[in-house]
Image: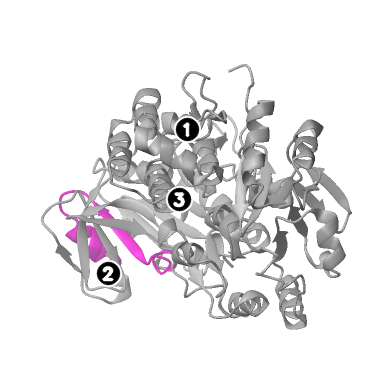
Amino acid sequence: MRYHVLACDYDETLATKGEVPQATTEALERVSRSGRKLILVTGRELDDLLGHLPSAELFDLIVAENGALLYDPGQRTRDALAQPPPVEFVNRLREKGATPLGAGHVIVATREPYGTDVLEAIRDLGLELQVIHNKGAVMVLPPGVNKATGLAAALERLDVSPHNVVAVGDAENDHAFLTTAECGAAVANALPSLKERCDLLLSKEAGEGVTELAELLLATDLDGVEVGRRHVLLGHHEEREVRLVPYGTGLAVAGPSGSGKSTVTTALLERLTEAEYQCVVIDPEGDYSEYPDANVLGDTKRAPSVEEVLRLLEPPRQNVVVNLIGLALRDRPAFFAELLPRLSSLRARLGHPHWVIVDEAHHLMPAELSEVPLKDPRDVGSLMLITVHPEALSPAALRLVNSVIAVGPDGDQTLAAFAEPLHRPAPTQEGDEGDIALWHTDADRAERVKLLPGRTERSRHRRKYAAGTMSKEKSFYFTGPDDRMRLRARNLHTFVELAEGVDDETWLHHLGRGDYSAWIRESLGDDELAEEVAGVEAEKDPAAEDSRRRVAEMIDERYTLPAEPTDHDPDH
């Protein structure tokens, strides 16, 4: 099962005018009985929501106040996920006559035309707050707080990854939370901008659309929904990008010693972990003992236990290297045979790990084995088998392979070794350039691919700029044309989130002055991205919404933006 959580917006998604259809409630009950979790994600204040939603206990968790409050219906606990604005801010809006005016545990909410009064109050009081617009509503929250961050907090409570979530919504404030989920769906009455960017467009409106999604989830686990933005970049075939599907892939990486298998594996492993897919590497020879993004279990003096591995994998953000160098060679297949079904059970319960990577796979699943403790790669998410001797792999292991990467200048022999057990002719190779050959076993041809190599050092810097805390001097400040605001973007994550919340005049003011590309060039040192953003800035009469979206997409193509807020040090 790929999708373990269904996350729903409330107004005009689950409910119409505050009412949830009975058929929709019954569909959600069936989803819950299937073993999946239900999370409600809403901009409403909690007490207002509970007054309209008699079936609140149906949900495992409720994210209210547009991501600022987490409510557990079973325990009836409320946890604020950020600090509220000062009382003076609410009083200032009340003095201005803002109506309606709501103040929750964190959120302050009103409606147009009081958005200008909100911005003036933020400026006059010198506050660092963001403004989120949603179908005429004006919501004020601390920077970086939105439905995506609230969903992330709920998932952390449940030990579930965003890669196991399908989310559904209809409005502006649903963009971030749908993008965070592995699959984002939009009901038929959603705003056009949300429909354009979602992964799955439902044919029915509001509650009927949620019912449609629930029935599709139960019947197929969304097997027919291709989420192309999640595919993992491998390299290029001529001018075209070549990507791998991150779920259900049984990948073999094979070639002679010294041909570059580790280069391929490291590049894919880096991109998987950067995208926050949980990986567990089975490492018989200790070759991954210093991999920077993983917890390493075992060394030359001590072999890890299965229970240790499972315990470390419970939180979905932890990657694990299982170093078997301290285990006798003859005992390694038995350890692996015990571990693999336990990994499958963990995934059945929590949805992760997402990838199991097996180095020296011919040692752990040798040809003499008639059976292996796995029937389908989907039982562990996806599987990567690395070997120098494909002919020495168990036939049962070879049956798990649906894609092959042949490494080295001549991959014909390697491809033939995988084709023979399938009783198929070896595929011909297509393309003159490329250092690897990729063959999907249901195709007649393999394509030569130019591998995009790993970039460990570059990734470390990019994570800092994406989610770390930049100094005051290097941060970006949204001030607007009249210096009415001073909203500080401490990293690219908060820059994108604040950009979504500021008014069009402020966005276009900085765009027209070339402030965005200048900041990226001077503070981040990314000339390539700066040039692309400068191209948007140079356009005549750019539209605010379109330019926002394009700049955000340019950033997201180069930097992995997290879905949760980061800890900020106020002294930096």
| Occupied quadrant, residue 48 | bottom right
First along the sequence among labels 3 and 1:
3
Q: Quadrant of the N terminus?
A: bottom right
**Residue at disc 2, secondary structure:** helix
**Residue at disc 3, secondary structure:** strand
First along the sequence among labels 2 and 3:
3
Amino acid under disc 2: Ala
**Residue underneath mark 3:** 358
- Residue 479 position within the rendered picture, expressed as x and y whole percent measured from the top left: 52, 30
Q: What residue lies at 54% left-to-right and 42% top-to-bottom? A: 502
- Residue 285 position within the rendered picture, expressed as x and y whole percent measured from the top left: 44, 38
Can residue 41 be spotted in the picture? yes
Looking at this view, is 172 or 441 the one in front? 172
Please state if 477 lies on the left or on the right of 240 as rendered. right
* Separation of residues labelled 3 and 1 (CA atoms): 56 Å
Q: What residue lies at 72% left-to-right and 64% top-to-bottom? A: 38
Query: Which stretch did the figure color magenta?
Result: 396-418
> In the picture shown, does residue 244 fall above or below 32?
above
Amino acid under disc 1: Pro
**Residue underneath mark 2:** 419
Please state if 253 lies on the left or on the right of 329 as rendered. left
Cβ atoms under marks 2 and 3 closer than 8 Å: no
Looking at this view, is 203 or 368 the one in front? 203
Looking at this view, is 539 or 321 the one in front? 539
For the residue carrying disc 2, how many other residues have a C-alpha within 10 Å: few (<14), some (14-19), or many (20+)?
A: some
Amino acid under disc 3: Val
* Separation of residues labelled 2 and 3 (CA atoms): 20 Å
